[in-house]
Amino acid sequence: GEALAEATGDPAARIEALRREIEHNSYLYYAKDAPAISDAAFDSLMHELRALEAAHPELIDPSSPTQRVGGYVGEQFAPIQHERRMYSLDDAMGAEELDEWLARVKEFFGTIPELVCELKIDGSSVAFTYEGGRLIRAATRGDGTTGEDITVNVRTVKDVPLRLRDGALSGIRDADASIELRGECYMPKTSFEALNAAAEANGKQPFANPRNAAAGSLRQKDPQITAHRDLSTFVYAVGDERKLMAETQWDLLKWLGEAGFHVNPDIALVTSAEEVHEFCRKSLERRDALPYDIDGVVVKVNSFAQQEAMGYTARAPRWAIAFKFPPEEKTTLLRDITVQV
Ligand code: NAD
């Protein structure tokens, strides 16, 4: 990787090679649900590209993979416009990068504001639209602006409420208007293993990991296939928070639970860097014991008003960070790669 770039000394050529390799692998990952390289290998390509672009700002291009939300809108699904854009998350690889983000937040507000720590569920992003309390649409993240209509498939996911609980409607400012709620659809580890065992027994291609299995199951032409896959959800976000009475991420999570969604119970409301680190440490320790995959911790500024004040980059909110865990052994089964320039 990096050594090769140094050796050739042509940053423009290296950047172009990285962009091509990243685009190709994103296509296999998002469009085909069949990655050819490990996430760790992919992340190191992105990391190197970001570092090179930072060192050579004149080479930044709006069509670079660093400037967009990774995703794909397939032609076999109708396009759905998201209520507001769906973003990706910036990564902190290790404690030092987490501290850099905490320092930026502290500098912005003068003090560390209330922060919410959540597990980073390694599934597939889904946006659920309710109108008058009833589920009317569901979409993938897609390119962030436009997602794929997977409503019929999502209707088969048993823990997605088809109707919000009555008591929760008072938490929506205009209960008759539509509202987009967002979360992660995932396949539990044991179900993933059973699915792959069955695929192999039938001579079919297995999925690379539970995340790709969840994404692939949601993007089926035939909802009967989705219905036979064991999928669950954790919901944690709203498209347009102005539509809710809740004014913080913490109150949003509470409301989502009351509305009938599955909300992940491992959450913490904290006010110091130490507590954030502690939450990350504990979550990493518990990772293997959880029945579903997590690939890190997401830390979010709690107040919606404070979130808006910090704003967004082209691809991610400034008010949140994904603290990434080191890759798990099993994902390194996929080939590791070096990009040629
Ligand atoms: P990401 O998955 O790392 O982070 C953003 C996503 O986290 C959000 O869209 C959301 O769906 C999810 N999330 C889970 N729990 C959350 C929570 N509690 N709060 C908020 N969001 C939460 O970023 P990405 O842009 O979706 O994808 C990048 C990932 O895909 C990387 O891990 C990368 O390695 C992998 N990837 C791999 C390949 C490959 O070839 N192996 C190719 C492309 C992407």
Image: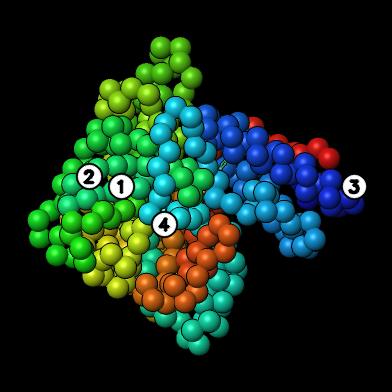
Residue annotated with mark 2 = 135
Instruction: Tell me: 86 left or right of 59.
Output: left
Q: Which badge, 3 or 4, comes first in the chain's sequence? A: 3
Instruction: Tell me: 177 left or right of 339.
Output: left
Residue 8 is tagged as 3
Q: Which badge, 4 or 2, comes first in the chain's sequence? A: 4
- Measured in 3D between alpha carbons, the distance from the residue under mark 2 to the one under mark 1, in whole angstroms, is 7 Å
Residue occupying the point 39% across, 76% down: 305
> Cβ of disc 1 within 8 Å of ligand 1?
no
Q: Is residue 72 above or below residue 318?
A: above
Q: Which badge, 1 or 4, comes first in the chain's sequence? A: 4
Can you tell which quarter of the image residue 226 is in? top left
Q: Residues within 10 Å of mark 3 (few under 14, many from 20)?
A: few
Q: Which badge, 1 or 3, comes first in the chain's sequence? A: 3
For discs 3 and 4, the disc positioned in front in the rendered view: 4
Q: Which badge, 2 or 1, comes first in the chain's sequence? A: 1
- Measured in 3D between alpha carbons, the distance from the residue under mark 1 to the one under mark 3, in whole angstroms, is 48 Å
Residue 84 is tagged as 4
Disc 1 on helix, strand or loop? strand
For discs 1 and 4, the disc positioned in front in the rendered view: 4
Residue occupying the point 41% across, 12% down: 202
What residue occupies the far top of the structure in this picture?
202
**Amino acid bearing label 3:** Thr
Q: Is residue 331 above or below residue 14?
A: above
Residue 128 is tagged as 1
Circles 1 and 3, Cβ within 8 Å, touching? The answer is no
Circles 2 and 1, Cβ within 8 Å, touching? The answer is yes
Q: Residues within 10 Å of mark 2 (few under 14, many from 20)?
A: many
- Measured in 3D between alpha carbons, the distance from the residue under mark 4 to the one under mark 2, in whole angstroms, is 18 Å
Where is residue 288? Give x, y as percent.
40, 47
